[in-house]
């Protein structure tokens, strides 16, 4: 039995246009023992900012560590509050978020999540101590 560690990073220049939430239910022997969560909000949905807000930090990654468990159901929501600056879908390409999940000292999932710049994304992952068991990717 070991804790889960969830790390997310994004170096996309336009990431200031998005809020995101990471949360997960940690189970041990079929019982929930922990609920991890992180919310990074830049602006209210619909803000339609013209430029990056003053004081915005490009360091919006997160590292969450849970209590010891044997299963993790992880949810990642990426929500645009300001749409891309172009009306052309060809000029607003998919961007990546880096996700790494460990169980104890063992990396069980390492993936680049592709995020739609217009709609964001809703991601559900189910993992055990060996890795991915079910995915909505």
Image: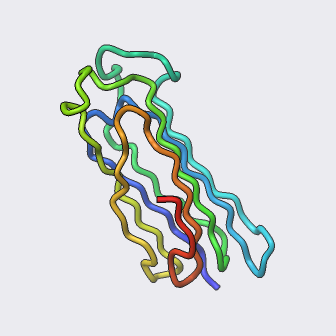
Q: Quadrant of the N terminus?
A: bottom right
Q: Is residue 26 above or below residue 63?
A: below
Query: Is 92 left or right of 10, judged from the image as shown?
Result: left
The structure residue drawn at horizontal position 29% and vertical position 45%, both measured from the top left corner, is 95
Does residue 116 appear left or right of residue 19 in this picture? left
* Image location of residue 7, percent across then percent down: 44, 60
Above-or-below relation of 124 to 89: below
Residue drawn at x 30%, y 25% as measured from the top left: 84
Residue 129 locus on image (x, y percent): 57, 82
The residue shown at (43%, 34%) is 119
The color scheme shown is: rainbow
Question: 25 or 3, which lies in front?
Answer: 25
From the top left corner, tell me how far across and down residue 82 is, in percent. Answer: 39, 22
* Residue 12 lies in quadrant: top left
Residue extending farthest right? 31
Q: Name the foreground residue: 112 vs 118.
A: 118
- How many numbered marks have been drawn onto this rendered protein structure? 0
Q: Is residue 75 left or right of residue 89?
A: right
């Amino acid at each position: 039995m070991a804790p889960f560690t969830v790390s997310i990073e994004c170096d996309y220049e336009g990431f200031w246009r998005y809020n995101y939430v990471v949360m997960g239910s940690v189970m041990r022997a079929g019982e929930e023992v922990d609920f991890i969560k992180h919310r990074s909000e830049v602006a209210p949905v619909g803000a339609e900012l013209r430029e990056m807000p003053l004081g915005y930090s490009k360091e919006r990654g997160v590292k969450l560590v849970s209590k010891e468990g044997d299963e993790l159901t992880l949810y990642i929501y990426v929500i645009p509050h300001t749409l891309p600056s172009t009306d052309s879908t060809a000029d607003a390409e998919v961007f990546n978020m880096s996700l790494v999940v460990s169980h104890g000292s063992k990396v069980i999932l390492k993936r680049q999540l592709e995020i739609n710049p217009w709609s964001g994304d809703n991601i559900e992952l189910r993992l055990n101590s060996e890795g991915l068991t079910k995915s909505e990717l």
